[in-house]
Image (spheres, rainbow, N blue to C red):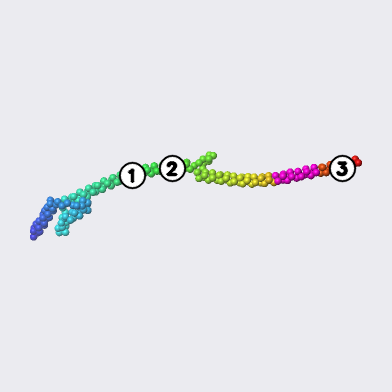
Amino acid sequence: MQKFKHFLYCLVALLVFNTAFAQAQQDTTKNADPSLNGQYQFMLSKSKSLYGARLINPSRLSSLWKSVSDTLRKERKQLQEARQEIKSQSATISGLKGEVSGKESSLAGATAMVNEIKFLGISFTKSTYNIIVWSVIAILAIALFVVIARSTKNILEAKHRTQLYEEINTEYQNYKVKANEKERKLARELQDERNKWDEAKGR
């Protein structure tokens, strides 16, 4: 009985081996999906079950393993290249940051020089200088306005006084003419009286 069971097991194993070998030799079906998942699903769809176990075609398993190895190798290579590129880009970024910092410092210095104005040996920023200049201009404008206003007032006052003087001078001239006429009149009257007196005295 033991020998019969042993013989039966050997016969089943031989049949399984022959079936797998025949499938490996006769398998010419093409897989439409070349991805790893597609190859895995194709391998499962073409495998057969025997007593709860899957009978896998060795050529398909080898092909899947080769694809996995190639994919891993490719991914590792791309990862290495990506790391090198990242390293190179990091170095480039560091260099660019240094250049930007230098240019920012130069720009800050140039901006400070442009915004700085020296007057009488004193440094001013443009805004401060503009405030001072416009303040001086405003003060001078106010002073000029005051001078013009006072000059106008003085000119008007001078015109008024000149007019008053001319009026007084005219009145004085009129008075003088009248006084001269009166004086001449009195002188004639006095002469007439003297003449009368002399005539009366001569008699």
**Mark closer to the chain start, 2 or 1:** 1
Q: Nearer the viewer, residue 147 or 69?
A: 147
Q: Quadrant of the C terminus?
A: top right
On the image, the x and y values in percent for residue 170 come to: 72, 44
Q: Position of residue 69 (x, y in %)?
A: 22, 48
Which comes sooner in the sequence, label 1 or label 3?
A: 1
Magenta region: which residues?
Answer: 166-185
Residue at image location 36% in from the left, 44% down from the top: 93
Image side of residue 158 versus residue 45, left or right: right
Question: Going by the image, does 49 lie left or right of 86?
Answer: left
Q: Residues within 10 Å of mark 2 (few under 14, many from 20)?
A: few
Residue holding disc 2: 107
Q: Position of residue 144 (x, y in %)?
A: 59, 44
Asked if residue 138 shows in the view, the reply is: yes
Q: Quadrant of residue 172?
A: top right
Q: Crowdedness of circle 1 by 10 Å Cα count: few (<14), some, many (20+)?
A: few
Give the residue type at disc 1: Gln
Residue to which mark 3 is pinned: 196
The alpha-carbon separation of the residues under discs 3 and 2 comes to: 118 Å
Q: Residue at x 78, y 43 (%)?
A: 181
Of callouts 3 and 2, the N-terminal one: 2
